[in-house]
Image (spheres, grey):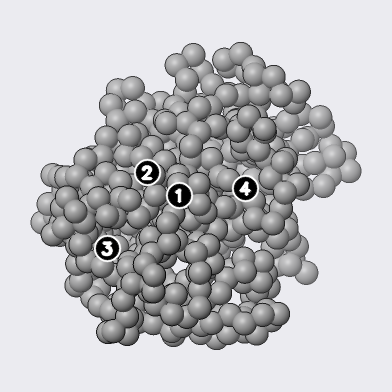
Amino acid sequence: MRTIRYFIDKRASETPDKVYMFAPEPGLELTYSRLRQDSIALAGYLASRGLHKGDKVSFMLGNGYQTAKIFLGAMYGGYVVAPLNLMAQPSQLRYVLEHSDTKLVFYTKDQEGKLKEAAAGVDRPVELVEIDNDAESILPPDVGSPRGGLPEIDEEDPALLLYTSGTTGLPKGVILTHKNMVAGGQYTAMAHELTPDDRALCSLPLYHINGEVVTAVSPLVSGGSVVMPHRFSTGNFWELISEYRCTWFSVVPTIISYLCSATEIEGRGLNLDQLRFGRSASSALPPSLHKAFEEKFGVSIVETMGLTETAAPVFSNPMDPARRKYGSPGQAVGNEAKIIDKEGNEVPRGVEGEIMIRGDNVMKEYYKAPEKTREALEPDGWLHTGDLGYMDEEGFVFVTGRIKELIIKGGENIAPREIDEALYRHPAVLDAAAVGIPDEVYGEEIMACVTLKPDASVTVEDLRKHCLEHLGDFKTPKVIRILEELPKGPSGKIQRLKLPKIVEELDS
C-alpha cells in the first residue's frame, strides 16, 4: 500500500528507535516510533477541531521540528496538507487561502501579521493556530487518536495540495495523491541508491516540492534519516554535514553558487568522508558552475530535474560519475519520458520538442481547474511539462527552454538558457536570466539581468563584450541590467518573466 501512513507504520514497527529527523536548533531528535505516535495525536487534535478526512490543513512555517511533523502527520491522519509559501505576496496568499478551502493553519509568531491580514480577506472561517516550531510538543497532553479511530486511506486519496510558484497569473493548485508522494520518494531513492544508512541534509523549504518529497519523504520510504535546520546558511552548511554525518544533500544552483563564492572547507577540521554526493534540481545547473563546485570541494554533484506536478523527481544523472553528462538533468528514473512535436507525435532522438512525462508520480489534477487539467494531462496519462528539449541516443534529456519563455527574435527561436549560461561564464556573475522584450525591428529583443558575486565589480559594457565573444552579435542582449537581486520562487528558481516589469519600475 503506497500511503504515507503505511511507511510511517512500517518504520515504527521495524526500527522504532531509529532517528528519522534531527532538528539542530532545539537539539531534538524524532524517532520513527515517536513520529507515529505524534502523527496519531495530530490526527486526533484535528478531528477535535471539527476536521474530517480530506479536509485541507495548512502551515505557514519555516523548516523545523514541528513543520516536518505536521507535514507528515496530517497526511498520516487522512488530511490534505496545503503548505503556504512564506514568500507569497499578500494578494497571492489570500487567493491560496481562499482557493484551497483550508480549514486550519499552523503558524509562528513572525508570520502572524501577514497571515491574519490575508485570512481576514477570506469569506469563510479559517482557524489560525500559533505554535513554537522548536517545541517538543504543540498538542494538549490529553489528546489521543480520533474518536472511532483513524479513517481508512487509499493510495489514490489526495495527500498534498501545493501551489505552483509560476511566473505569471494566479498560481495553480497541484493535487498529489499518496501514491504520487510515495512514488516520488521511491524514484528519488532509486536514482540515488539510498539505503537505511543514508542521511540527508534538508536545505530547501517544506513548502516546496523538492524539500517535501526529496528530503522528507525519500528518507521515510528508504528507511533513512534527515537533518532539518531552520534554513540554508553558508555559515553552517558544511558544519551540519560534518556534525550529523550527512551522506547527501539536495540544493539548487543558486545555493551551489553561494557555496562556491562564500565557503571554504580546508583547515576547518570538518569530517566529510561519509558525504557521498550532492543533488541539484529546480533549475538548470550551468556546466561551468557544476565543474567549479566539484573541483573546489571534491564533492560530486548529481544534476536532476523535477516538477511540482510530478512529486519532484523526473530525471537524474547516474550515480557513476563517469556516466554523467554535464548540462543534462539525466535520464528518466521510475517514470517514462518522451519528446513530442506540436502535433503530439514523438520525435526522433536529437530532435527538439516538448518534454512529456508519465508515471505513478504524475499529479492527479489541478485543484478546481478541470480545463487546465485537461490541457496538461492527456487521457493516457502523459503530462505536458511545458519544457522544450531533446533526448540523445542514451536517453539523456537536454532542456533548451520553456515554451512560453522562448525569445523569438526576427523569427529565430532563442532559448534564454543559452544566454544565461554565457553570462554565468563571467567570473563576476552570481545569477543571470535572459528574457524577451518587445522590439519594433525584430519583434522581440533580448534583455539580460544579472546579480554579482560579493565584492565583485563589472560594467555593463564588460558584460556586453563577454556576450559578443561567447554568443555573437545576434544573440548578445540588447539590454543588460545589473540588479541587486533577481525575483525567485521558493525553490530558488529565477522567475524571469517578472524581470521586464521590475526593470520598468526601476526606470520610472
The disc label shown at residue 36, or none: 3
Kind of residue at disc 4? Glu
- Where does the image place residue 47, in percent across and percent down from the top left? 44, 75
User: Where is mark 2, residue-wise?
Assistant: 1
Answer whether residue 446 is visible to the viewer in this image.
Answer: no
Q: Are marks 3 and 2 in contact (CB under 8 Å)?
A: no
Label 4 vs label 2, nearer the camera: 2
Q: Secondary structure at mark 1?
A: loop
Residue found 36% across the figure and 67% down from its top: 149
Answer whether residue 347 is visible to the viewer in this image.
Answer: yes
If the image is split into quadrants, where does the C terminus sit? Answer: bottom right
Residue farthest toward the front in the current orientation of the protein = 148
Q: Are marks 2 and 1 in contact (CB under 8 Å)?
A: yes
Residue found 39% across the figure and 44% down from its top: 2
Q: CA distance from mark 4 to mark 2?
A: 21 Å
Label 3 vs label 2, nearer the camera: 2
Kind of residue at disc 3? Arg
Precedes in sequence: disc 3 or disc 4 = 3
Label 4 vs label 1, nearer the camera: 1
- Where does the image place residue 15, in percent across and percent down from the top left? 15, 53
Q: Are marks 3 and 4 in contact (CB under 8 Å)?
A: no
User: Where is mark 4, residue-wise?
Assistant: 365
Kind of residue at disc 1? Asp
Q: Is residue 442 above or below residue 45?
A: above
User: Where is mark 1, residue-wise?
Assistant: 154
Report crowding for label 3: few under 14, some 14 to 19, many 20 or more residues within 10 A (C-alpha). Answer: many
Q: Is residue 152 above or below residue 84?
A: above
Q: CA distance from mark 4 to mark 1?
A: 17 Å
